[in-house]
Image (cartoon, rainbow, N blue to C red):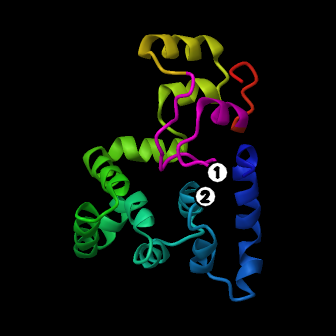
Amino acid sequence: YNFTKLELILNVLIYFYQKIKQFDIKDIDILDIMTSMHYDVYYLFSKNLISLESIIQKSIVSQKFFAYFYHEIDDYDHEYAEKRKDNILNGNDSNLSNFLKKVIANPEDHKQNREKSNNPSPLHKSIREDDIEEFQSILAKNNYDINYNFDYSYYERTLTECKTPSLIQIAATYGSIKIF
């Protein structure tokens, strides 16, 4: 939940990982702990602490991991990726299916959003940056209700109780005093 210092916390894990491995803790064990923390897993993957093989192994039980790392998995094992992709696209989870469709259709957007690790909405960005002028402008131009709730984003790094947080919840989460 301490997202403002998340990279620092993850870097501590990276620094001590060789010591941690002495206790027979593997990267797949870390993935088991971080099931809902896609950004954390991506960060550790980008720092070579978690292997693609472990992500693929985890993607067998977690469709979200598969969608989040679709392009890497597809490059590594195209046949497996095709089977899993079809399974998700024809499955019951329309949110995940729509997310995977966007990942496939816009790989560069996906990679940029994954790297930024925030909800890509301009309104969300204005709250994160505590930019009251931009916030008010977006509200007025788009006729958003003050009780507006954001759609779920697979890119959002903060964990909130609500999958569709309100404007005030995001302002509180990010400490956006002016917006709050």
Residue that appears at 42% across and 58% down? 68
Label 1 element class:
loop
Q: In the figure, 100 relative to 141: above or below?
A: below
Element marked by disc 2: helix
Please give the residue where the numbered disc 2 appears in the rendered image: 40
Q: Position of residue 7 (x, y in %)?
A: 69, 51
Q: What is the C-alpha distance between the residues marked 2 and 1?
A: 18 Å
Mark 1 highlights which residue? 161
Instruction: Inspect the image, locate mark 2, and give the three-letter code of the amino acid beneath it.
Output: Asp
Q: Amino acid at mark 1?
A: Glu
Query: Relative to the observer, which residue lies in front, 57 or 119?
Result: 119
Q: In the rendered view of the protein, which quadrant contains the C terminus?
A: top right
What residue is drawn where x is 51% and y is 21%? 145
Which quarter of the figure has residue 135?
Answer: top right
Residue at left offset 31%, top offset 50%: 98
Residue 54 percent coordinates (x, y): 49, 77
Disc 1 packing (10 Å; few <14; some 14–19; many ≥20): few
Q: Is residue 85 magenta?
A: no
Q: Nearer the viewer, residue 5 or 33?
A: 33
